[in-house]
Image: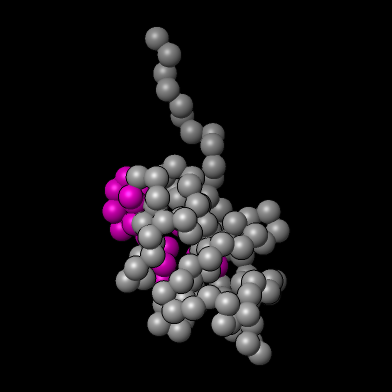
Amino acid sequence: MAEFHKLAAADEVGQGEIKQYLVEDRFVALCNVEGEFHAFEDVCTHQFTHLSEGEFTDAQVTCPLHGAKFDVKTGAAKSLPAVKPVPKHEVKVENGSVYVALNPKRVKVGGGRGRRRR
């Protein structure tokens, strides 16, 4: 069974807002789309910037670094340069509080191929 962590009071993240939280050692973005909460790994899969610092409109968040767009409902990458989705986290609302269960999948930061030296 998934372990849920309390993130916020339900009224802390208003309609059309996105906020960042730290859960264990992971950055989590929580957003409110028409009264429905969505949580995902707050790291762009392209260049590892915090997505919560980008523009959030129409259930999409835009990476502030290179403009990649992600669907906050599914985590899917919707535009280049990102091609990999961000991991979504399970959300539940109980007694006026929002809780999240972390997805075991993570955005792998660093460890890329790097540039070849000649």
- Position of the N terminus by quadrant: bottom right
Can you say whether 61 is above or below 48 in the image? Answer: below
Q: Residue at x 34, y 51 (%)?
A: 68
**Residue 71 at x, y percent in the picture:** 37, 65
Q: Is residue 26 magenta?
A: no
**Which image quadrant is residue 117 in?**
top left
Residue at (29, 48) in percent of width and height: 80
In magenta segment, residue 85: yes
Residue 47 seen from this side: yes
Q: Where's residue 19, x and y in %? A: 53, 66
79 with respect to 2 (left or right):
left
Which quadrant: the C terminus? top left
One can see residue 98 in this view: no
**Nearest the eye: 104 or 54:** 54
Which residue is most to the top?
A: 118
Image quadrant assignment for residue 9 = bottom right
**Farthest bottom residue?**
95
Most frequent secondary structure within the magenta stretch: loop
**Residue 54 point in image, percent of width and height:** 41, 56
Q: Residue at x 32, y 71 (%)?
A: 58
Judge by depth and name the residue closer to the eye, 9 or 24: 9
Magenta span: 67-89
Q: Quadrant of residue 85?
A: bottom left
